[in-house]
Amino acid sequence: MMLHDKVALVTGAGQGVGQGIALALADQGARVAVTGRTREKLETTCELIAQRGGEALPVVCEVKSAESLQQCLESVLQSFGGLQILVNNAQEVPLGTLEQVSDASFTAGWESGPLATFRMMKLCREHLQGDGCIINLASSAAKRWDMTGYGAYAATKEAIRSLTRAAACEWGGQGIRVNAILPHATSPALAWWIDNNPEEAAEFIATIPQGRVGDCEQDIGRFVAMLCSDASGYVNGQSIALDGGQAYLG
């Protein structure tokens, strides 16, 4: 097991990509703190992990609240005694044209995305020193051929990529690696988008060279587990698209 004796904290792990990552980390031996806003969803993820012989802890957390983030970390440290892996996945998504996105929606996207990532990385830094790994969730939305309707969302995700690069440069000497992934995955959020934008979704999927959207655990979670392991010990400060070859980040 690549992550035996590691402790991981995954935000937004009650469903979708966060759940897939939590399951994959646990399969590789990590004890996983499963965090999010809805306890019932968190407990479902923890039950799935337990059924496979893993260990997980549900922690209710509102990532837009600095106090809640602090309490979340304290709960993890108290229960597991340390932390080696942080995955910042949770975020509210401000979708729509610039005129459609309200100040409140954009602010929620900012507070739950780059601001929460910024806060959580700084809270966890001292505990990750020596052999720590941070994975932040970004998006290839800023690389779209047509940015109509995705400007606010892409802005929050590009901010996360910038924070990722800065943390990797500033903390690499402390034994902390920081990378970002840009995934396409069969999450509830994507399912909603496909249902509500069938024509655009069909065009979108047609531009993926592998012709499909990734699986939350098999395609996204397993890669994250490898990225957090010693096998990826020299990978730092990178933005990695997990999208079947669609985006070109160069």
Image: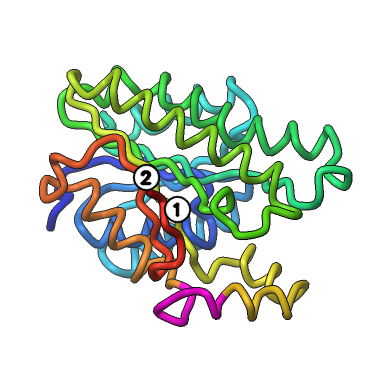
Instruction: Residue 239: give its label.
Output: 2
Q: Earlier in the sequence, mark 2 or mark 1?
A: 1
At 68% from the left and 48% from the top, the residue drawn is 93
Q: Main secondary structure of the magenta part?
A: loop
Distance between mark 2 and mark 1 Cα atoms: 7 Å
At 69% from the left and 51% from the top, the residue drawn is 150
Q: Give the range drawn in magenta.
A: 205-213
Determine which residue is flagged by label 1: 182
The local crowd at label 1, few if under 14, some if 14 to 19, many if 20 or more residues have their Cα within 10 Å, is many
Of the 4 image quadrants, the one containing the N terminus is bottom left
Secondary structure beneath dot 2 equals strand
Q: Whole-percent x and y of residue 18? A: 47, 54
Instruction: Residue 219: give its label.
Output: none
Residue 133 lies within the magenta run: no
At 58% from the left and 26% from the top, the residue drawn is 115
Locate residue 168 relative to residue 208 in the image: left or right.
left
Residue closest to the eye, 209 or 21:
209
Secondary structure beneath dot 1 equals strand
Q: Mark 1 is on which residue type? A: Leu
Q: Whole-percent x and y of residue 98? A: 81, 43
Q: Mark 2 is on which residue type? A: Ser
Tag count: 2
At 47% from the left and 74% from the top, the residue drawn is 208
Disc 2 vs disc 1: Cβ atoms closer than 8 Å?
A: yes
